[in-house]
Amino acid sequence: MFQNKEKINVVWLKRDLRLTDHRPLKLAEASDLPTLLLYVFEPILLEDPHYSERHWRFVTESLTDMNRHLARKISVAHDDVVTALNQIQSNYQVASIFSHEEVGLAATYTRDKAVLTWANEHSVNWVETASGAVIRPCANRDSWDKNWQKVMRADLVDNHVDLIKIVSFKFNTSKLPATWKRANPAMQAGGSSQARKVLNDFFDSRGVDYHRLISKPRQSQLSCSRMSPYLAWGNISLREMYQHLLRHWNRTGWRRPLIALSSRLHWHCHFIQKFESECNMQFEPINVGYRNMPYRHDAQSDQDLVAWQTGNTGYPLVDACMRCLNKTGYINFRMRAMLVSFLCHHLQIDWRRGVSHLASVFLDFEPGIHYAQFQMQAGVTGINTIRIYNPTKQAQEHDPDGLFILQWCSELSSLPKAVLFEPWTLTAMEEIMYGFAIGQDYPAPIVDTQKTYRQASERLWSWRKRIDVKTDAKRILRRHVRSN
């Protein structure tokens, strides 16, 4: 069957689009066999509502950046992975597949099972290496923090891709959109080179106020690290970033921002681990007591959902955040939490109806973090603090001059700051004075948040007291919080 076919290894790239601190590439380097570097644009993901063109542009840019450092280019397929492997097998004899474990959606888990079946049927050795400090399987967290520190402080994998004899296979990719190769200046560009520029820029100067400005929707765009898409798509490993941080640990004036950033890197793996251990949270609340939580499903809720998705709710900060996301793929953490709270608490819309939309606009969509965080902010875990965000109060506290709002809701520019956060309070005379009509120039509020706040608070706290919620909360704590 394999007569006259060259024996090779395959490094299957997924969310690890880099050439440094890369264990699968090191395994290929240590082998005597030539290696094919494979990336597959899979229809199951291209058609998935969690993803959009911005993600595939970022991936394309990442692959282009990798190719600049390789003697032969990465082989790119546009098919399901098993079909791509069969095509490779038609020209080569695949000995081993090396890849990182992927903590992904149900679709990628099903795909992985199909790849394992294919590997077994073709006597191919598939070696998966851990991603970051995520443990598979993980029954509890008793030694998890120690393992995180051990992994993050371990020596980086010393990759020498120039020592790998790279072979290639020409797939038919003619149907991949050409727009993926066109830069979008409104969004961060992909690639390890860009990742390092952004990281160095953060530590050069702009990160010194990270801890103070992290909650500000406008200032955080500069003061935050902006490394999340590069971590999500593996342009840089979490360990590389953490060790870069440690090299600055004793820098004068930087201790507080570095402590804050370090904690973020730690919970990055924590939330992915939670999703790895309970991946059904893609479909159901992690706490089974919330499975019958009441939500609106009427025709008006459909319209309200669209208003939320497009940034036309009548609440300036909510709309500014969503419009910013739709355009740039980024807003800071607090504003993301506010968007989820507005959807689930004020609009009383099931979190599952909004989770894929935010994934599709987050350039840094990471399944594990996304689902664990979404459920936490929606208040359906039974273990986290219940937070119901008041969008007007958030605007007054974190965008007091309204600069972020005016950047994204320019139709409000004629209004004085006194009414900018609540334009619906304008009197008829004031509308005439400012040449502004609520409901025409800017949407009227789709809900009354004073009323919905009380309703949401009563609903969430009454459910929190339920026996089934409390019982499953204890199970969740046993599994995801260390016992000592």
Image (cartoon, rainbow, N blue to C red):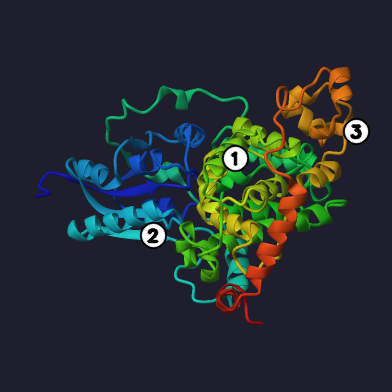
The answer to whether residue 27 of the structure is visible from this angle is no
Name the kind of residue labelled 1 in the image: Asp
Q: Residue 161 versus residue 338: which sits nearer the camera?
A: 338
Q: Mark 1 or mark 3: which comes first in sequence?
A: 1
Look at label 3 and name its amino acid.
Ala
Image coordinates of residue 304 in percent, x first then y, are 59, 40
| Circle 2 residues within 10 Å: few <14, some 14–19, many ≥20 | some
Crowdedness near tag 1: few (<14), some (14–19) or many (≥20) residues, C-alpha within 10 Å: some
Q: Residue 354, labelled with which disc?
A: none
What mark, if any, has residue 418 been given in the picture? 3
Q: Residue furthest bottom?
A: 484
Q: Position of residue 433 (x, y in %)?
A: 89, 18
Which residue is drawn at the image coordinates 69% and 43% (left, top)? 447
Name the residue beneath numbered marker 2.
128
- CA–CA distance between discs 1 and 3? 27 Å
- CA gap, disc 3 to disc 2? 58 Å
Q: Is residue 268 left or right of residue 91?
A: right
Mark 1 and 3 residues: CB-CB less than 8 Å, in contact? no
Give the class, few, some or many, for how many residues have Cα within 10 Å of label 3's Cα (few <14, many ≥20). Answer: few
